[in-house]
Image (tube, rainbow, N blue to C red):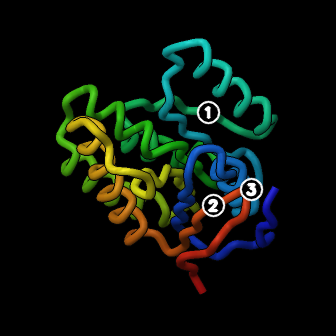
Amino acid sequence: MPEVSPHPSFRRALVLGGARSGKSRHAEALTMAAGPAPWVYIATAEAGDDEMRARIAHHRERRGAGWHTIEAPLDLCGALSGAADAGSSVLVDCLTLWLANLMAAGRDLEAEQAALVDTLVTVSQTRPVVLVSNEVGLGIVPDNALARAFRDAAGRLNQAVAAACDHAVFMAAGLPMVLKTAG
């Protein structure tokens, strides 16, 4: 697990990276270092198939005791607001799954993004919030309109959240590269 300062000074942190880059593990460590248990884990994934069920089970097992899980595939703002009294710090994993859920539901992505940033700023006034997101814009240009729309929307979402955060880390091969830091 990447080393994390025992007393991080952030209010809002974003952990970006590619698939299997160590994002979730690093975000969990940041969340735990930010305050005592219980910690709140807001999950945006839905177990639509056996492979995703196995991923979710692996994440839960790795986290262990001390975590309170809230499932929020669409209502991330409501879950964040509701988590304000449920634990010392909050982890949202992950923004790109939430974005995919929003797109599938035909939601207004700009309005949802703006609401998320507003909610993030409000909730982080009382407890640290860590968010995980995939960086999907580093590969080849997708060959279909839906995949290109997703890539572009994910890039815009990551930019908006990163701008609102006081700490941002890019994960590669399990190693954190600090992009932005508080204090």
Q: Nearer the viewer, residue 50 or 57?
A: 50
Residues marked 2 and 1 touching at CB (< 8 Å)? no
Mark 1 lies on residue: 69
| Residue depicted at 22% across the width and 45% down the height | 109
Q: Nearer the viewer, residue 86 or 108?
A: 108
Q: Earlier in the sequence, mark 3 or mark 1?
A: 3
In the rendered structure, which disc, 2 or 1, sits on the residue that comes first in sequence? 1
Amino acid type at circle 3 is: Ala
* Res 29 label: 3
Name the residue carrying label 2. 171
Q: At 20% across and 38% down in the image, what residue appears?
A: 145
Q: Residue 105: percent from the left, percent from the top?
A: 25, 26
Contact? badges 3 and 2 (CB < 8 Å): no
Q: Where residue 158 sits in the image (x, y, percent)?
A: 39, 59
State the separation of the CA atoms marked 2 and 1: 24 Å
* Residue sitting nearer the eye, 148 or 93: 148
